[in-house]
Image (spheres, rainbow, N blue to C red):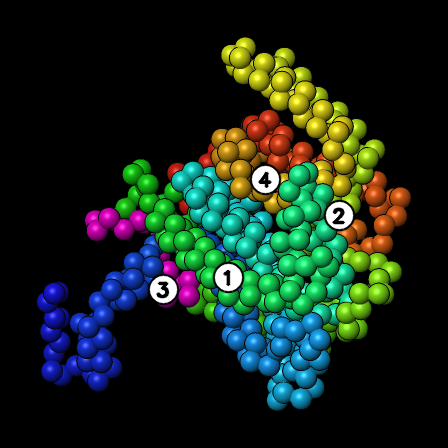
Amino acid sequence: MAEFKEISPNASAGAKLTNWFENRFPTAFDAYRVHMSEYYAPKNFNFWYIFGSLALLVLVIQIVTGIFLVMHYKPDAAKAFESVEYIMRDVPWGWLIRYMHSTGASAFFVVVYLHMFRGLLYGSYRKPRELVWIFGCAIFLALMAEAFMGYLLPWGQMSYWGAQVIVNLFAAIPFVGPDLALLIRGDYVVGDATLNRFFSFHVIAVPLVLLGLVVAHLLALHDVGSNNPDGIEIKGPKAPKDAKGKPLDGIPFHPYYTVHDILGVCLFLMAFSAVVFFAPEAGGYFLEYNNFIPADPLVTPAHIAPVWYFTPFYSMLRAITSEMMYALIACVVLGAAFGVLKGRMPAVFKGAIAVAAAVGVVLMLSIDAKFWGVVVMGGAVIILFFLPWLDCSPVKSIRYRPSWHKYVYAVFVVNFVILAYLGVQPPSPIGERVSQVGTLFYFGFFLLMPWWSRLGEPKPVPDRVTFAAH
């Protein structure tokens, strides 16, 4: 047993109470020191670094509001819609809790997308933070599953038919598809069994996985240290340190960045409250108008689309048509030819590339385009896991990469927004063509990154982080 720490009899009551707790629960105080007061973060963080803490805040909002919603919600196909209406109309402050939860779902994806984009800008996925990035991508994947399953629970028209369309996509998988779709639905159509399964996963299973991944993400981050806008390591063996071994380019996370994050939280809550109180539907993007109509298996909405944060990937799904398959086959053939002719590798690897490409072309010609649409939609998320090994730039941060890299990232963002917009629009010939080009650019951005990220002359990287006191 650890020795008790003594404290002066003349100490304040607060100091005595703190000492009492520390002697009986030293692990908590050690964790506070390791992860807060003695965790040194780079001194040049900017506003891009508030979105991680905001994501944690929104997670807490979702859990707390979800607990209160579950008290009154009934996961029954005959009563689910009425129970949501009961929450909105009869439960005291129920409308506020429901709007906070629905707005929180969209806010979660807003801050997570911005958090991931910051990692993309400053190379936060590069060595030694590969595992931090992988945990973050796993959080994103779990968040998508959580949002999809929660979207069915209001049992409105768009919830019902959106789930019907997405679950039916799994049936396109060869051999196991129909059985897999049946397993997910729990029935031959989306019904009461599906609602109960999705409710169980949304309330219990996926949140537990999500919380575990968040803890792993934070622990992995604090083990290797935070990145910064310059992409310079402040804790490495060559980093400047004081006599006590503390990094000269770092400051304690608490109180400096807790204050920094509190400012971000205040600004976020102002915007969040404005949406909750004045525009909770956000023009039909946060809460679709069709979802205020009870689910009816006999009436199909004119246009079925997922909620906005899924629409970039839904656009990629719709972009894969029979004629688009020929463009994808051409990309596979050209990629394999380039690898065989220009690649510096043993002949056996070149042969393997040629064989794999031939097998891929045969499969693409023989399997329905609907299946490949599902593959592309899933691949658009899975490819993010490999980003640490796709980026071959000699520098981490966008600040010191060739200037034209900024335009590549800007086009990537614009392309992603256009795909998101097209995903909520009814299908059209022009929209289909644009989404096909956008899909090719999205995957080209990542798959060609080993080549284009090395082009150009990087700017000189300073030895220490650039920081101006203010």
Q: Are marks 4 and 2 in contact (CB under 8 Å)?
A: no
Left or right of residue 319, residue 98 in this image: left
Residue type of the residue flagged with mark 4: Ile
Q: Are marks 4 and 3 in contact (CB under 8 Å)?
A: no
Q: Of label 4 and label 3, which has the lower sequence position?
A: 3
Residue shown at 47% from the left, 39% from the top: 126
Residue identifier under label 2 = 315
Residue shown at 56% from the left, 45% from the top: 121
Residue shown at 45% from the left, 55% from the top: 213
Q: CA distance from mark 4 to mark 2?
A: 17 Å
Label 3 Cα crowd, 10 Å radius (few <14 / some 14-19 / many 20+): some
Q: CA distance from mark 4 to mark 3?
A: 35 Å
Mark 4: secondary structure:
helix
Residue identifier under label 1 = 205
Residue identifier under label 4 = 383
Label 2 Cα crowd, 10 Å radius (few <14 / some 14-19 / many 20+): many
Mark 3: secondary structure:
helix
Residue identifier under label 3 = 254
Left or right of residue 208, residue 329 in this image: right
Residue type of the residue flagged with mark 3: His
Q: CA distance from mark 1 to mark 3?
A: 33 Å
Q: CA distance from mark 1 to mark 4?
A: 25 Å
Of the residues tagged 4 and 3, which is closer to the observer? Answer: 4
> Where are the magenta residues, as a range?
242-258
Residue shown at 89% from the left, 44% from the top: 429
Mark 1: secondary structure:
helix
Label 1 Cα crowd, 10 Å radius (few <14 / some 14-19 / many 20+): few
Q: Of label 1 and label 4, which has the lower sequence position?
A: 1
- Residue 29 versus residue 408: which sits nearer the camera? 29
Residue 254 painted magenta: yes
